[in-house]
Image (cartoon, helix red, strand yellow):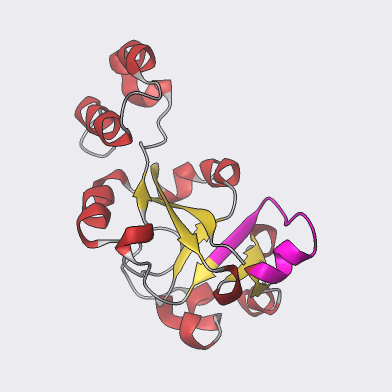
Amino acid sequence: MDRVTVFHLTRVRRLPLIEEEGLRTRADLSDRLGPPGELDRAAPGAYAHGRRVSAYLEQRHAEQHVDEHGPGLVSFTVDPRKTLAVPSRHRDGDPAAYWQQAQPLSAWMADGTPPDDLEVHVNVPVRAKHVRLHAPLVRDEDLGAYAPLVAAVADDRLSAKALMHLAVIASSDDF
């Protein structure tokens, strides 16, 4: 089975670190570097205690969680046979029940069309050669007076890195 592209969200200030050192494992989907939470402690085996990198299968679903995880969009590829996936709608309940719903991504894909809200968990660090940085997911209100400038120049010819630098320049310190 071919590798599948998944989408990870983080804070914009973490993107240069991800680019320089590759995507490092950390607890949950965000860049929480503190103690592992309840969901992390309930994870099975090698996925426990934040020893995983998590992402969403669909970019459209990832974009709905920008306020929670940050607007820094990163994609990478995973082997569906070596990756656990769980629909995110199960996250709000009991953490043990969440992990009981987990099955390999390949199983979700073999059943036909996988759910749009799949969270994908990899229990090993993602190799840097599979990581791709995208421009941050910014809204016009985030850019303020710079929104017309970004709208005028942002097309396929502008690299994601250049747009990211423009967005960081235009943002406040806590962007």
Asked if residue 72 lies in the magenta stretch, the reply is no
Residue 53 visible to the viewer: yes
Range shown magenta? 106-120
- Percent across and percent down for residue 8 are 45, 54
- Percent across and percent down for residue 70 are 39, 46
Give the residue furthest to the bottom.
Answer: 45
**Residue at point 28%, 61% (across, down):** 22
| Quarter occupied by the N terminus | bottom right
**Residue at point 54%, 62% (across, down):** 3
Instruction: Choose top left, top right, bottom left or bottom right for residue 173.
Output: top left
Asked if residue 113 lies in the magenta stretch, the reply is yes
**Residue at point 27%, 49% (across, down):** 15
Instruction: Choose top left, top right, bottom left or bottom right for residue 128.
Output: bottom left
Task: Name the foreground residue: 139 vs 149.
Answer: 149
Instruction: Choose top left, top right, bottom left or bottom right for residue 140.
Output: top left
* Residue 120 to residue 50: above or below: above
